[in-house]
């Protein structure tokens, strides 16, 4: 059995959106295992509480923040809270995403497009600008945007989702 090499993130801090389950949760756990303290953001307070307990069980600090990533004021408060809690922010992971409606292009409502655009694209831009300003001032930082294969190959019945994920693929 081959072991997977891990990066040492000791002393690093990360903010992860969409962290309560799936890919975001796995990233939060992986970063904590690698030594990072993590601020985890999602809409579900209960899921965040469970994640925080797991991260703290690994000996790392965790700041769970119930946040609607589409709300710019909440995004600003979240980034400021993470920096205040940890003293600095080294890594931002823009993972929050939504598929929402499913259907032919002409059947998708403008509200379906708005939800996908606000969650999958605009929120990532907002968080990157907020965290990025801090990282630039520090002279260091990393931003990870979670894309999707559908951003490259498209997806029948999910045009709105594919469009938002394509922004991060090129």
Image (cartoon, rainbow, N blue to C red):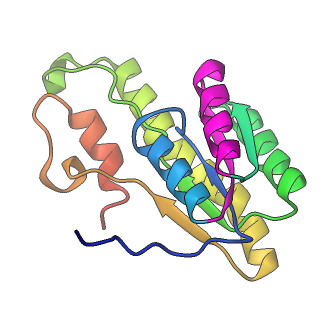
Find residue 45 and report its image quarter.
top right
Q: Does the magenta stretch include residue 122?
A: no
User: In terms of depth relative to the viewer, which is nearer, 37 or 108?
Assistant: 37
Residue ID at (84%, 57%): 86
User: In terms of depth relative to the viewer, which is nearer, 9 or 45?
Assistant: 9
Percent position of residue 71, x then y: 67, 31
Residue ID at (71%, 59%): 131
Report the residue that reaches farthest toward the front.
1
Look at the picture and state if 162 lies above or below 74. Answer: below
Residue 149 vs residue 70: left or right? left
Q: Say how many tags the image has.
A: 0
Residue 157 vs residue 50: left or right? left
Look at the picture and state if 170 lies above or below 27. Answer: below
Find residue 158 and report its image quarter.
top left
Which range is magenta?
35-58
User: In terms of depth relative to the viewer, which is nearer, 49 or 122?
Assistant: 49
Residue 151 vs residue 84: left or right? left
Percent position of residue 35, x then y: 64, 65
Percent position of residue 64, x then y: 71, 36
Image quadrant for the N terminus?
bottom left
Q: Is residue 45 magenta?
A: yes
Look at the picture and state if 47 lies above or below 30. Answer: above
Residue ID at (31%, 17%): 109
Image quadrant for the C terminus?
bottom left
Residue 7 vs residue 3: left or right? right
């Amino acid at each position: 059995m081959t072991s997977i090499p891990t990066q040492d993130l000791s002393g690093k801090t990360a903010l992860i959106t969409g962290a309560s389950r799936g890919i975001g949760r796995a990233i939060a756990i992986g970063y904590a295992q690698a030594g990072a303290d993590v601020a985890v953001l999602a809409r579900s307070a209960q899921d965040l509480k469970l994640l925080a307990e797991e991260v703290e069980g690994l000996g790392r600090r965790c700041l769970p923040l119930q946040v609607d990533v589409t709300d710019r004021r909440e995004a600003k408060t979240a980034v400021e809270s993470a920096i205040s809690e940890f003293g600095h922010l080294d890594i931002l992971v823009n993972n929050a995403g939504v598929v929402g409606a499913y259907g032919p292009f002409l059947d998708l409502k403008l509200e379906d497009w708005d939800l996908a655009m606000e969650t999958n694209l605009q929120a990532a831009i907002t968080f990157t600008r907020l965290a990025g300003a801090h990282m630039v001032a520090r002279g260091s930082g990393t931003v990870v945007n979670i894309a999707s294969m559908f951003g490259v190959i498209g997806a029948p019945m999910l045009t709105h989702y594919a469009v938002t994920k394509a922004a991060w693929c090129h």
